[in-house]
Image: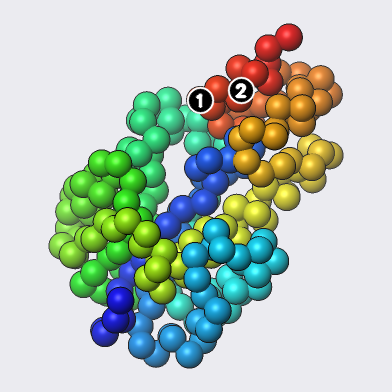
Amino acid sequence: MAVDEGHVGVDESGKGDFFGPLVVAACFVGPEHLAELDGVKDSKKLTDLQSLSLARKIRAACPHSVIAIGPQKYNELYAKFKNLNLLLAWGHARAIENVLEIQPANMVISDQFAAGGAAVKRALYEKGRCVEFRSMVRAEADVAVAAASILARAEFLFRLRKLGEEHGIDLPKGATNVIATGKRLVAKEGAGVLPNVAKMHFKTARQVLDD
């Protein structure tokens, strides 16, 4: 997609990971930024080290906002919204709003997630932001969305590692290979530790706490 005058891309990381935060990032990319974004593509096609390296370049070059929702806050918000798509929409709208405060733009592009696009539009309009909002399948092909995905992934990786260090345990990514780690952590610190490090609406939480 042509950048033209520039636009904002938004994406998230951590929504499928049991441990760690949910991170939403928004990034403005204009023609003046393209030379600095060589190698930028969907973070799912990059190694962790590549994401961390590229994130430094993106942060230095582009107006951006990164919203990190730690496990405790995530669990509070999920209890409030009772729907992951609504929680995502809230995070997307907040990140987009932050970027638009720095860099006005007429278009925002997001990956498609259920009815989330409509919810993001409503949240933006409630804040008086009348921008064209496109929710697209495979939006990461767009450079601004790809840049946002890398920023979100890098922040997720940093915070997941930091969270593990705080509890003296290596917290793995994903949701299917994490039960043994969760059980070790609960055995070490008690069941009350789990909402501080994990997303409690995952069925994985019940599997970890099951004796």
Q: Tell me whether the residue at label 2 lies in contact with that at label 1, contact meaning CB atoms closer than 8 angstroms.
A: yes
Asked whether residue 4 appears in the rendered view, the answer is: yes
Is disc 1 placed on a helix, strand or loop? Answer: loop
Specify few, some or many for label 2: CA neighbours under 10 Å numbering under 14, 14-19, or 20 or more. many
Q: What residue appears at the point 61 percent right and 23 percent down from the top-left corner?
A: 205
Is disc 2 placed on a helix, strand or loop? Answer: helix
Residue 107 placement, left or right of 161: left
Name the image colouring: rainbow
Q: Is residue 194 above or below residue 122?
A: above
| Number of on-image labels | 2
Q: Position of residue 148 (x, y in %)?
A: 46, 65
Q: What residue appears at the point 39 percent right and 35 percent down from the top-left corner?
A: 84
Residue 139, quarter of picture:
bottom left
* Residue denoted by label 1: 201
Q: Is residue 166 above or below residue 54?
A: above
Location of the N terminus (image quadrant): bottom left
102 or 25: which is nearer to us? 25
Residue 88 placement, left or right of 67: left
Q: What residue appears at the point 45 percent right and 67 percent down from the top-left corner?
A: 146
> Which residue is farthest top?
211
Location of the C terminus (image quadrant): top right
Residue 199, quarter of picture:
top right
Residue 188 placement, left or right of 114: right
What amino acid does circle 1 point to?
His
Q: What residue appears at the point 41 percent right and 64 percent down from the top-left corner?
A: 140
Asked whether residue 189 appears in the rendered view, the answer is: no
* Residue denoted by label 2: 205
Q: Position of residue 29 (x, y in %)?
A: 38, 78
Q: Position of residue 76 (x, y in %)?
A: 47, 30
Badge number at residue 73: none
What amino acid does circle 2 point to?
Ala
